[in-house]
Image (tube, rainbow, N blue to C red):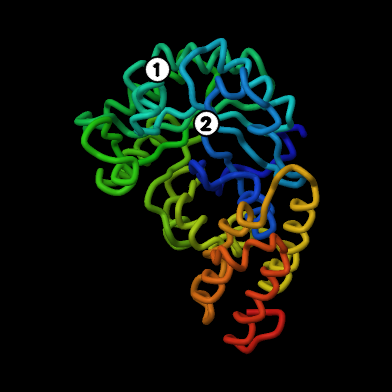
Amino acid sequence: MTTNILPARRLSVAPMLDWTDRHYRHMARQITQNTWLYSEMINSGAIVYGDKNRFLMFNEGETPVALQLGGSDPAELAQAARAAEEYGYDEVNLNCGCPSPRVQKGAFGACLMNEVDLVSDCLNAMQDAVKIPVTVKHRIGVDRQTDYQVVADFVGTLRDKTACRTFIVHARNAWLDGLSPKENREVPPLKYDYVYRLKQEFPDLEIIINGGITTNGQIAEHLQHVDGVMVGREAYHNPMIMRDWDALFYGGTHAPIEYADLVQRLFAYSQAQIRSGRGTILRHIVRHSLGLMHGLKGARTWRRMLSDATLLKDNDGTLILDAWKEVERANRFGDSV
């Protein structure tokens, strides 16, 4: 797929470990046609030395879809990026923002913000290996680096030394010691103004903001200052927030998907995946759908049924339809909400 027919990165769903796998991305794509979807972070070594199908296979129709890589070895990252391109990904993204101890032990993620020359080498090696865009996702600083100039120098150096022109900025510091990964997503203060300043200082770059964004109103406000918005946990726990994104932010004219239609698609998908012989079970699929009825009557029943081990043991996607009947009955609507 050539990049010139892809939608702009005005909206994207963040890479989230153990969450944004191909089953979640399939559901998200039924809700929004234009939003960019990012894989969970995959270690470059796992791709180079492991089972490529396991880590890289995705569903037809997921595009635009990007693969996020974790790693710090330029040659290894280049091989992984080449594999991503061969599998059909539209972008490959380098993680320079994850603060988890496991990632630090591998000398990549957020700690790479202290190694900008190494990041340059990694990005250049990846870009030399592929024709698809190579992008980077990073924080605004590490530990007690609280000055704006820290992130400005990081971005400016990469602009000067690499062909990377898309920077996805999580507007928080990453604490490499003393905070858990969950706390690192919540405790360091958000500094959206730093990201806005990056766009002002580097108008030639595509700057995408990430961190703590939960409403369409917030998205619209951020888009007054930057090129794109990346939404994380809200898009996972409340997937139907994406229902209006095509119309609101891409000028789409198609009708938003109805709940009943989405449920039918998820049912058909689950049955096809279970019958594919690849070891997929219903629980792998429906765990990403627990927040789908957020805000509706019967949402608790939907969650309970789709997470009930006894009900899931039959491995039959009909459970999705049964859970939907309870929601439909509670809300007294037909095919629309």
Observer-nearest residue: 146 or 25?
Answer: 25
Rendered location of residue 175, percent (x, y)? 26, 34
Residue 234 appears left or right of 278? left
Image quadrant in which the C terminus is located: bottom right
Question: Label 1, label 2: how many angstroms apart (C-alpha)?
Answer: 13 Å
Q: Residue at x 40, y 25 (%)?
A: 155
Q: Is residue 5 above or below residue 327?
A: above
Rendered location of residue 132, percent (x, y)? 67, 26
The answer to which quarter of the image holds residue 118 is: top left
Q: Residues within 10 Å of mark 1 (few under 14, many from 20)?
A: some
Which structural element holds mark 2?
A: strand
Rendered location of residue 331, percent (x, y)? 58, 86
Q: Amino acid at mark 2?
A: Thr
Image quadrant in which the N terminus is located: top right
Which structural element holds mark 1?
A: helix
Q: Residues within 10 Å of mark 2 (few under 14, many from 20)?
A: many
Q: Residue at x 46, y 55 (%)?
A: 219
Observer-nearest residue: 187 or 324?
Answer: 324
Rendered location of residue 137, percent (x, y)? 46, 32
Residue 157's disc number: 1
The answer to which quarter of the image holds residue 160 is: top left
Q: Residue at x 78, y 45 (%)?
A: 277
The residue to which callout 2 is attached is 166
Q: Is residue 99 above or below residue 117?
A: below
Q: Residue at x 30, y 49 (%)?
A: 186
Q: Is residue 255 visible?
A: no
Q: Is residue 149 visible?
A: yes
The answer to which quarter of the image holds residue 283 is: bottom right
Q: Is residue 193 above or below residue 142?
A: below
Residue 58 appears left or right of 303? right
Which numbered disc, 1 or 2, marks the residue that appears first in the sequence? 1
